[in-house]
Image (cartoon, coloured by chain):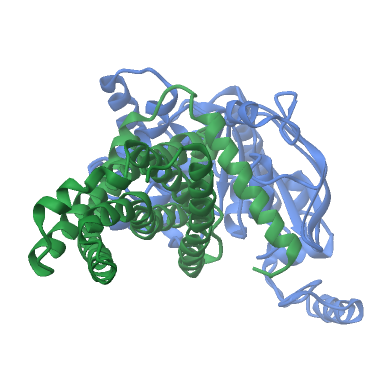
Amino acid sequence: MRLSPAGALRHSGNLFAMALDVVRTMPRRPFQAREFIQQAWFVASVTILPTALVSIPFGAVIALQIGSLTRQLGAQSFSGAASVLAVLREASPIVTALLIAGAGGTAICADLGARKIREEIDAMQVLGIDPIHRLVVPRVLASMVVAVLLNGLVSVVGVAGGYFFNVVLQHGTPGAYLASFTTLAQLPDLWAAEIKALVFGAIAAVVASYKGLTAKGGPKGVGDAVNQSVVITFMLLFVTNFVMTAVYFQVVPQRG
Amino acid sequence: MGVEICVEGLTKSFGHQVIWQDVSLTLPAGEVSVMLGPSGTGKSVFLKTLVGLLKPDCGSVKIAGRDITRLREHELYEVRKLFGVLFQDGALFGSMNLYDNIAFPLREHTRKSESEIRRIVLEKMDMVGLIGSEGKLPGEISGGMRKRAGLARALVLDPEIILFDEPDSGLDPVRVAYLNQLIVDLNAQIDATFLIVTHDIASARQVPDNIGLLFRRELVMFGPREELLTSDEPVVRQFLNGRMQGPIGMAEEKDATQVEQELAALGDGDTTQTPGSRALTPRLLPGPGITRPPRWEAIARHEAELRHRKAVADA
């Protein structure tokens, strides 16, 4: 691939065009329920365990940071509130996004890329089947659903991890930790995080599918595609996260 | 009955590199045509352009009166149901076993019951000699079996047009002979339009009604088999005889003076060359178990006459 401004623009355009195709194809019948369930199961199976394992230390790190900070400020009673806020608002969608892109997206990209270079995708098109409808849409939906569910998992595990570290290791008071839960965080925070996860899941799957379906040049091409898909997804996710957070603060009145 | 494919002024390039330009030909309905050409002359690209996987720069491909280069995406998917394509390596779906692979088009496009699908799939598998391998995965079988399975999948929707991308590459001569016989038998049975892209000369001499030759970014010749086999065009003669002397070089083409010298030298020693290199190879006819439609009856009569004439001449 040659690096040129025109090439970069063309790729962005094609990526966006495919995203639109996915949206346009989504309502088309018959819905590929079987493929959707298989993919959802698959994405879930490759992401659940790493997500849980990542979110425990993540919650712990936040608890440690906030714990020492609140102690210095003499605001121990707020450590629970701050750690819930951090986990719920930022940590869980980002952890979800990293895992969905890193574990789910790479698997999707490698799978579609291998099919592409073995001419399976061409064969499918020749058999009169639209790969966007048959393969990409179920994957995007599966990844969105799993991302939303994972986000819930990360929130729970992260908060539990934070609680454990704060109470057991830093000798915080359990009552104060739990009582301050809702002083800063509010229900819209959870909704916002779930919407973020939904969007991140969609982006990860669309980028992975796009890179997979445009892989070329043999097995090495598939490797390159997977690599690029992870990098592109991460960049897009962090930008999207920033924009969505900014919008959220404008739209939803904050507590405190 | 098959469908006629009418190609006009087709040009394709990738970036600045022209693959071929101004290709015009008509694949007659129900006949077998072969597209020959040295490696790297864009034969596979031509095939993919015919099914609309690649868009040509200009020109048209008319199938059943519809120009597929100008169709919208969903119309293209409709027209593609007329096609069966055998890809180079079979292009089977790696995650499915052979049975599911062959049943795939039926399950996607028809509302047939599972027992009916089973009947059709087993019939096609029997046709290509794969009975007993239904449960195998594409990764577990040989290249020849993958090709035959790919053919069975291409046949399952009863296509009007069948395209073969190098059906003989990577197969041993015996399997190639069987595959050629299978192609001829199929043509007699289902009457579809066939296009075979290959560089195997032996198959090209025996199997088709028409031969085309792609070389040097253009269609050198396209016409009835006998016309090509007896042609004096240097490129055609060189390719059909598989010799080094002629316009085709290792790296695409040679300069004109060298070609002239080589051909002159070849002309001097022509008596020592294998005789009959311009002779007509007998055509492959449908096997004894196949009921021949009128077209093949006529071809068989013509072949018998040629053989008789040759016997008389030899005597």
Residue at 43% of width from left, 34% of height from top? Answer: B288
Instruction: Identify by letter the chain in green.
Output: A
Q: Nearer the viewer, residue A169 or B207?
A: A169
Question: How many numbered markers are drawn?
Answer: 0
Quarter occupied by residue B7: top right
* Percent of width and height locating residue A47: 27, 54
Left or right of A17, for residue B23: right
* Percent of width and height locating residue B2: 62, 26
Residue at 9% of width from left, 54% of height from top? Answer: A174
Q: Nearer the viewer, residue A121 or A13?
A: A13
Taking the view exactly as shown, the residue that stands out farthest to the front is A74
Left or right of B39, for residue A144: left
* Percent of width and height locating residue B220: 82, 55
Q: Nearer the viewer, residue B8 or A126?
A: A126
Quarter occupied by residue A168: bottom left
Residue B279 appears anywhere in the view: no
Q: Nearer the viewer, residue A99 or B149?
A: A99
* Percent of width and height locating residue B84: 53, 36
Left or right of A180, for residue B31: right
Above or below for A129 versus B222: above
Above or below for A88 versus A194: below
Residue B289 appears anywhere in the view: yes
Residue at 56% of width from left, 50% of height from top? Answer: B165
Residue at 66% of width from left, 40% of height from top? Answer: B52
Quarter occupied by residue B256: bottom right
Q: Colour of chain B?
A: blue
Left or right of B8, for residue A78: left
- Could you tell me which quadrant the N terminus of chain A lies in? bottom right
